[in-house]
Amino acid sequence: MWQDLLSALALVLVIEGLLPFLTPAGYRKAMITMLEMDDRKLRIMGLGSMFAGLFFLYLVRS
């Protein structure tokens, strides 16, 4: 179980690092856009991302 959790965390870090590595200017622009969003929109995006991740995990594991 711990190995799976740490593998998932490592994969998240790899995926999170792709955008700033490939397009630093695009990443900077995305961060500026996020800074200008209100908290409600960011929370909705985060919730949607969590649900999408859970759904994808369900598909992969079943």
Image (cartoon, rainbow, N blue to C red):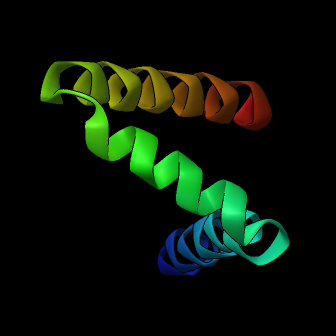
The x, y position of residue 45, in whole percent, is 39, 25
Q: Is residue 45 left or right of residue 39?
A: right
Give the residue displayed 51% in from the left and 70% down from the top: 5
Q: Which quarter of the image is occupied by the C terminus?
A: top right
Give the residue displayed 79% in from the left and 65% down from the top: 23
The x, y position of residue 9, in whole percent, is 53, 72
The image quadrant that residue 11 belongs to is bottom right
Q: Is residue 25 above or below residue 41?
A: below
Q: Is residue 62 left or right of residue 32?
A: right
Residue positioned most to the left: 39
The x, y position of residue 16, in whole percent, is 62, 65
The image quadrant that residue 10 belongs to is bottom right
Tell which of 56 and 3 is nearer to you: 56
The image quadrant that residue 40 belongs to is top left
Q: Is residue 40 above or below residue 46?
A: above
Q: Is residue 17 above or below residue 16?
A: below
Give the residue displayed 48% in from the left and 30% down from the top: 49
